[in-house]
Image (cartoon, rainbow, N blue to C red):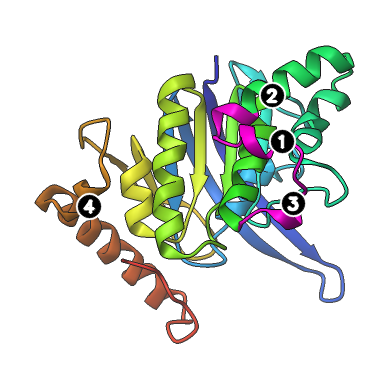
Amino acid sequence: MGELVLDRIGLSYGQPSTGSSFLALSEVNLAIKDGEFVTIVGPSGCGKSTLLMLIAALLQPSRGAVRLNGREVTAPGSDRALVFQDFALLPWRTVLANVELGLELKGIRAAERREIARRHVAMVGLRAFERHYPHQLSGGMRQRVGIARALSVEPEVLLMDEPFGALDAQIRQVMGSELLRIWERQRKTILFVTHDIDEAIYLADRIIVMSASPGRIIEDIPVTLPRPRPLEIRNSAEFTAYRQRIWDLLEEQVRASGSWEQETVDSH
């Protein structure tokens, strides 16, 4: 089970030097069903990544609560796994040893964790690279190792923070297709932050659009494109309509933030 609820989440940061505070998130309400793939888009600084940190309990909300399967989330746990943009692999560990890391932290015995790690390395298509080190891999391969490591601990919710942001456009599209293949097999609940509108549409069951700071949800858009989704679906009229709708919402928010010249939202 991976039913996730954000109940009136707010987050403020104090500024002791001035005695004031900065409101980062305001009244965020969101319910995600078990097995849903939800993407989040919004202007830079709106709190997208902060939401993932709150769900992972690496931050605590100033108000409201995060609940997973009806239980309030107050501390990090293996029921939630976070995949970052920068791969976060240990350079002195092989592919297999990197995937084993979370299993080690859970106290799983060596033989069992090796078997689990090998299964997940194979699942992301890296069986032939088990003994390679991160510096011997391409960026896309390193990110696949990160995904395998996150999935190996059997989380109920997979949190992904711009995981393909450092990859070039072609590899990024291929990685999106690979992620969907894995998701369709496992049906994990996924919350995926991205600046790329096409990526958000292609992957999601639902797209959450956030406002400029303080971040709040301004639109919750169901995506009714059929699955499985070939890459060519991006050229369809339905896909184009989603792209235009989301771009219109984001353009308004970026302009409202007062930082139009600094913001770039990728609509391609």
Local SS, label 2 = helix
Note whether residue 65 is visible.
no
**Residue at disc 1, secondary structure:** loop
Residue annotated with mark 2:
118
Residue at the spot of label 4: 234
Tell me how far mark 1 sits from mark 4, CA to CA: 34 Å
The quarter of the picture where residue 248 lies is: bottom left
For the residue marked with disc 1, what is the amino acid? Glu
Residue 187 among those drawn in magenta: no
Q: Earlier in the sequence, mark 2 or mark 3?
A: 2
Q: CA separation, marks 2 and 3?
A: 16 Å
* Disc 1/disc 3 C-alpha distance (Å): 10 Å
Q: Residue 87's spot in the image, x, y percent?
A: 68, 52
Residue at 42% across / 82% down in the picture? 260
Residues at marks 3 and 4, CA–CA distance in whole angstroms: 32 Å
Vertical placement of residue 268 versus 18, above or below: above
Residue 206 x %, y %: 34, 38
Q: Is residue 54 found left or right of 202 in the rendered image?
A: right
Q: In the rendered structure, which amino acid carries the disc numbered 3?
A: Pro
> On screen, 243 above or below 204?
below
Residue segment shown in magenta: 121-138
Separation of disc 4 and disc 2 at Cα?
34 Å
Write down the residue under mark 3: 134
Residue under the image location 48 percent in, 65 percent down: 168
Looking at this rendering, what residue extends furthest in the bottom direction?
A: 261
The percent position of residue 43, horizontal first and vertical second, equals 46, 66
Residues marked 3 and 4 touching at CB (< 8 Å) = no
Report the mark closest to the observer, 4 or 2. Answer: 2
